[in-house]
């Protein structure tokens, strides 16, 4: 959600730490051949709509042809990662997920969550990911700037694909959703819809989305989500 005026100093400090962390982690991960780091969650939304948001944590997708092998490689890399003023403490590791507590000096800890996604093929000219589970994830590189004017470039999922993802989730048509839809999710979709996009690009992304229901049209799913957020 948009940034509140209260606790502005704490927000700026946390955001600077997060951007430094995401940049260091992304750069380190992409030293591995065939492994790509894509920033997701609220930082991706902020980059797409160019509007400051509150951030509870840092979310990343790691696209790889071999998740089981590369999750251990990434964990090993992060054990050796040295970032001045930061310590990384492993919180949780599963077959497809790594979570770290990022411990800054003289600041509250931050959480970094990395979800590993299996890609069947990577279109290197555009860095679009064709998933083993079906679907295509297009990405773009966008900047985020910290309070000191330092610019960081991050790979994020494209605006039409990001809109498509939230449209499908919020429509209520996803089978076995991971969690209930929250009010903040509706706010995030509204923010994404405030960006510059073409409806046909969103429908194309929906058609190539792994969570798109097979028994419904793109327009049906889109309209269900629009009704829910009352746009």
Image (cartoon, rainbow, N blue to C red):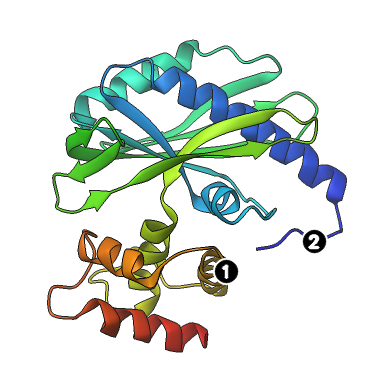
Instruction: Kindly tell me whether residue 102 is visible in this rendering.
Output: no
- Foreground of the two, 136 or 111: 136
> Residue tagged by mark 1?
194
Rendered position, 89 above or below 147: above
Percent coordinates x, y for residue 102 in the rendering: 60, 30
Quadrant including the N terminus: bottom right
- Foreground of the two, 78 or 216: 216
Percent coordinates x, y for residue 149 in the rendering: 77, 31
Secondary structure of residue under mark 2: loop
**Relative to 202, 181 lies left or right:** right
Rendered position, 29 above or below 1: above
- Foreground of the two, 205 or 57: 205
Q: How many numbered badges does the structure rendering display?
A: 2
Locate residue 227: give its quadrant: bottom left
Percent coordinates x, y for residue 54 in the rendering: 68, 55
Mark nearer the N terminus (2 vs 1): 2
């Amino acid at each position: 959600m948009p940034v509140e005026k209260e606790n502005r100093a704490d927000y700026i400090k946390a955001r600077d730490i997060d951007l430094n962390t995401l940049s260091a982690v992304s750069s380190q991960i992409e030293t591995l051949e065939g492994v790509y780091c894509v920033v997701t969650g609220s930082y991706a939304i902020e980059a797409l709509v160019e509007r400051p948001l509150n951030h509870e944590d840092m979310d990343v997708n790691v696209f790889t042809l071999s998740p089981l092998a590369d999750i251990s490689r990434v964990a090993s890399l992060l054990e050796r990662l040295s970032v001045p003023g930061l310590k990384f403490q492993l919180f949780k590791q599963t077959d497809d997920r790594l979570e770290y507590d990022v411990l800054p000096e003289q600041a509250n800890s931050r959480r970094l969550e990395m979800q590993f996604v299996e890609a069947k093929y990577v279109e290197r000219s555009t860095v679009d990911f064709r998933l083993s589970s079906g679907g295509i994830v297009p990405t773009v590189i966008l900047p985020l700037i910290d309070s000191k004017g330092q610019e960081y470039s991050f790979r994020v999922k494209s605006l039409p694909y990001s809109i498509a993802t939230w449209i499908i989730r919020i429509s209520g048509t996803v089978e076995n959703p991971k969690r209930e839809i929250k009010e903040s999710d509706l706010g995030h979709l509204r923010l994404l819809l405030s960006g510059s996009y073409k409806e046909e690009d969103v429908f194309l992304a929906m058609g190539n989305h792994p969570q798109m229901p097979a028994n419904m049209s793109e327009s049906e799913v889109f309209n269900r989500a629009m009704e829910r957020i009352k746009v």
